[in-house]
Image: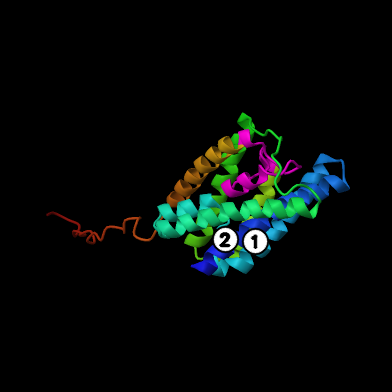
Amino acid sequence: MIRRVAAELMGTGVLVAVVVGSGIMATTLSPDLGVDLLINAVATVAALGVLIWTLGPISGAHFNPAVTLVAATRKEMAAKEAGLYVGAQVLGALLGVALANLMFALPAWEVSTNDRVSTGTLLGEVVATAGLIGLIGAVTRTGNGHLGPVLVPAWIGAAYFFTASTSFANPAVTIGRAFSDTFAGIAPSSVLPFIAAQLVGAVAGALLTEFFYPRPGVIPEPLDLPEPVHRPEGNS
C-alpha cells in the first residue's frame, strides 16, 4: 500500500510539474500562443506515457481522482484505499506545481489569475474527462491495458487541441494548477466549476463503458430453445 500511494503521489506530482514547467518554458521560448500550446501538449503527452508505463504496474497509474472514484464506485478498490489515492494525488499536485515554479525562479505557490470559466470550457472538460474514463474502461475491459501508455496520452494530446478547455480532465491537476500564475494556471474561482464538469464527465464516461463494454454476465445468454418440429408435407 505504501508503494502504491507513493507511486500516485510521485506520478501526479511529476505530471503537474511537466504541465506547468513546459508551459513556463514555452512562453519563454515563443510569444506565439499556438506554439506555446503545442510545446505544452507534446511535453505532457510524452511524460504521461512514461509515467503510465513506469508506475502503472505499481499503482495502476491513476494520477487522477476521477479515475480513482470511478474505480471505487465499481468496487474495484476499497474506499480506504481510494481515499489514500486521492489524498496522495492532491498532495502530489501541490508538490509538483511548487517544483515547476521553483525551477523557473518563481514563488513555490502563487495564486493564478487565469480565469477559464465559460460554457465552452466547461463543456470541454465534460468531453475530455468522459473520453478519458471511457478509454480507460475500454482498454481494461478488453484486456488491452498494455496499450494504456500509448492510448491515454494520445487522447489527452488530441483533447488539448479540440476542446475549449485544453483538457485538464483531472481534479488534482486542476487544484495544483491554481497555484501557478503562469501559462498553465487556472484561477481559484474557476477550480470548482472545472472539477464539477470533470466529475460529470467521469460519470458519463463510466456509463459509456458499461454500455459498450458490459461486465461478463451482464448480457443475457441466448435462450436455449428447442429445434422447431418439421411436419411432413401432406394431409395431417
Marker disc for residue 150: 1
Q: Position of residue 136 (x, y in %)?
A: 54, 56
Residue 184 on the magenta segment: yes
Q: Is residue 144 visible?
A: no
Q: Is residue 69 magenta?
A: no
What residue is rendered at 25% in x and 61% in y?
A: 224
Task: Work out which quarter of the rendered image holds the C terminus and state it.
Answer: bottom left
**68 to the left or right of 174:** left
Is label 1 in a helix, a strand or a loop?
helix
The front one of 101 and 76 is 101
Q: Residues within 10 Å of mark 2 (few under 14, many from 20)?
A: many
Q: Is residue 232 left or right of residue 8?
A: left
How far across and down, in percent of the image, does residue 183 sit?
Answer: 76, 42
Which one is in front in this view, the residue at disc 2 or the one at disc 1? 2
Q: Mark 2 is on which residue type?
A: Glu
* Three-letter amino acid code at the position of disc 1: Val
Residue at (62%, 35%) from the top-left corner? 190
Distance in Å between CA atoms under marks 2 and 1: 19 Å
Which comes sooner in the sequence, label 2 or label 1? 2
Q: Residue furthest front?
A: 107
User: Could you classify mark 1 by the number of other residues whose Cα lies within 10 Å: few (under 14), some (14-19), or many (20 or more)?
Assistant: some
Query: Where does residue 56 sit, x and y in percent of width and height?
Result: 57, 66
- Which label belongs to residue 197? none
- Where is residue 132? Give x, y as percent: 57, 50
Dominant secondary structure of the residues highlighted in magenta in the image: loop
Range of residues picked out in magenta: 162-190
Please tell me whether residue 30 is drawn above or below residue 227 in the rendered image.
above
Q: Residue at x 62, y 60 (%)?
A: 11
Q: Which residue, given by chain and number where applicable, does mark 2 sit on?
A: 8
Q: Foreground residue, 218 or 50? A: 50
The answer to whether residue 14 of the structure is visible from this angle is yes
Secondary structure beneath dot 2 equals helix
